[in-house]
Image: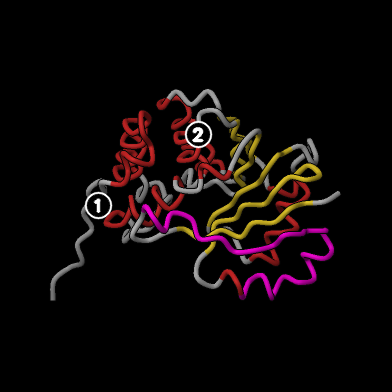
Amino acid sequence: MTNADTSTEREPVEAAQIFGARIELARLFAQALSDHGEERGLIGPLERPRLWTRHILNSAIIGPLFSGRVADVGSGAGLPGVVLAIARPDVEWTLIEPMERRVAWLEEQKSSLGLDNVEVVRARAEEWKPGAVMDAVTARAVSALRTLIPLTAPLVRDGGELVLLKGASAPAEIDAAAKQIKKFRLSEVRVEVVGEDVLPEPSRVIRARVRA
């Protein structure tokens, strides 16, 4: 019985298309995550062979959905926040993360990659003080939608959006979150598949409009 291959995935050809002139920054982030992600508890031991396709490109492909000021709740390793900040330097990103060691990682990446469009905030989403000021909020691999809505919707301005990365169970999550959708006055709640014409494994997001 042989051990599973845990070498880092080679950069897919689609990466340069998605990141354009920012591809070198994406490569630096991918290398840093490959070199230090497991030892720092940011990614699991089986993630390196799919680092680009499952994590980096899965995050980057949704970049065109954002504008203005956006928060990434539970940013962790910087997926999707750091990746999106690389892909969309014209958008202001606030990375909200409660764990000190992950905040340290995010600050390091902000500095080493020169991401002047990033602010890192050590807090839980429910501790967010400024109120409903974001044009959009995103999150990835944080929790089920019914739990995520109360954490993210209060950060979004009237008319802003939730854009939450999800898997194949997204439609079922919407059904299970009916009470929270009503309570937090969400509308236009739907699943969108992003990148079907670009990636072999496109991304799914739940999008919803937030009303005050």
The part of the chain drawn in magenta is 172-198
Secondary structure state at the residue bearing disc 2: loop
Residue 16 picture location, percent across and down: 31, 39
Residue 170 in which image quadrant: bottom right
When the figure is inspected, residue 190 is found, relative to residue 61, above or below; the finding is below
Q: Are marks 1 and 2 in contact (CB under 8 Å)?
A: no
The residue closer to the viewer here, 154 or 18, is 18
Check residue 190 for magenta coloring.
Answer: yes
The residue closer to the viewer here, 45 or 31, is 31
Which mark is in front, 1 or 2? 2
Label 2, on which residue? 88
Q: Residues within 10 Å of mark 1 (few under 14, many from 20)?
A: some
Residue occupying the point 67% across, 52% down: 162
Residue occupying the point 30% across, 39% down: 31
Where does the N terminus fall, quadrant-wise?
A: bottom left
Q: Earlier in the sequence, mark 1 or mark 2?
A: 1
Label 1, on which residue? 9
State the CA–CA distance, disc 1 to disc 2: 24 Å
Residue 17 picture location, percent across and down: 33, 40
Check residue 200 for magenta coloring.
Answer: no
Residue occupying the point 73% across, 45% down: 160
The residue closer to the viewer here, 114 or 18, is 18
